[in-house]
Amino acid sequence: MERDGNASDHLPRQAAGIPQDELVAGPSGQPESIHPQALLAQVLERANLQRALKQVRQNKGAPGIDGMSVDELPDYLRHHWPGIRAQLEAGRYRPQPVRRVEIPKPDGKSRLLGIPTVLDRFIQQAIAQVISAQWEPHFHRHSYGFRPERSAHQAVREVQATIRAGYGWVVDMDLQAFFDRVNHDRLMARLKSRCLDTGLLRLVNRFLKAGVSVGGHIEPTTMGVPQGGPLSPVLANVVLDELDWELDRRGHRFARYADDCVPRRRNEGRNPRRCRAA
């Protein structure tokens, strides 16, 4: 699908020359701090874009609504990146709607995914790398999902250690359909608390409002961060960070992995309902 493109002439050429076994960019590539008013410029820096392209190519994945494959992306960028970059810098870039895919769950229900086009995945990945670097120092230490050098195994070990320390009351929390129900206004307000770059905030909001293609029809997206794109996990952590610090303020020990959370107490105390409601 042809787009009014813009990008950097040299970006695809340089990225294509890097061996496949070097495609994974580790967390050491992230800047420790980024000036909040220069975030969009950081997103569009060549090194950040190269890392994003490598990650998208490594992740592979299905095409979006335009049918473009991951393998076609580097050549497309060679011809169109200068125009796409100009649109991004001028605030004119418009993401395409995501493609709705339903994945069966063991309980008989379906998990709704939103598959962005590979071009939008590339741009989302570049944004996610910068937002992650901006927020990472402030996330709670007991948040384990979709973070550099953290894993579900670490979350399990944290739960086991806390149980051995005498925290025997456990609340197993799963936020039902969390990714589908995120409030956009609340999310953008959270992002704005650490991001003063209006250009980047506008771009993130456009990804949230890009719509979804269902059976050939475009439907608006008024809430949620569709699973399927690289930006969604980072935005989910930004939203749930508020929950993490509230649990911490109340004195609960917990481990959270994405929208699954396990708060724990030594006992129910004098107010059992407070423990269960936490």
Image (spheres, rainbow, N blue to C red):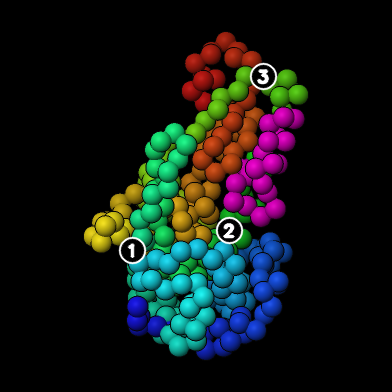
Which secondary structure lies at badge 2?
A: helix
Res 121 visible: yes
Question: Who is closer to the viewer here, 60 or 24?
Answer: 60
Which contiguous range is marked in magenta? Answer: 143-161
Q: Residue at x 49, y 84 (%)?
A: 75
Label 1 and label 3: CA atoms lie apart by 46 Å
Residue picked out by circle 3 = 168
Residue picked out by circle 1 = 97
Residue picked out by circle 2 = 132
Residue 2 drawn at (x, y percent)? 34, 81
Residue 78 lies, with reference to residue 128, above or below; the image says below
Q: What residue type is labelled 3?
A: Gly
Q: Are marks 2 and 3 in contact (CB under 8 Å)?
A: no
Residue 159: in magenta span: yes
Question: Residue most toward the top?
Answer: 270
Which secondary structure lies at badge 3?
A: loop
Numbered disc in front, either 2 or 3: 3
Residue 171 drawn at (x, y percent)? 56, 24
Numbered disc in front, either 1 or 3: 1
Q: Residue at x 60, y 13 (%)?
A: 269
Q: Left or right: where does residue 71 sit relative to residue 141? A: left
User: Mark 2 or mark 1, which has the lower sequence index?
Assistant: 1
Label 2 and label 1: CA atoms lie apart by 24 Å
Q: How many labels does the image show?
A: 3
Q: What residue type is labelled 2?
A: Ser
Residue 228: in magenta span: no
Question: Who is closer to the viewer here, 175 or 69?
Answer: 69
Q: What residue type is labelled 1?
A: Pro
Q: Residue at x 31, y 54 (%)?
A: 221
| Label 3 Cα neighbours within 10 Å, binned few <14 / some 14-19 / many ≥20 | some
Question: Residue most toward the left?
Answer: 217
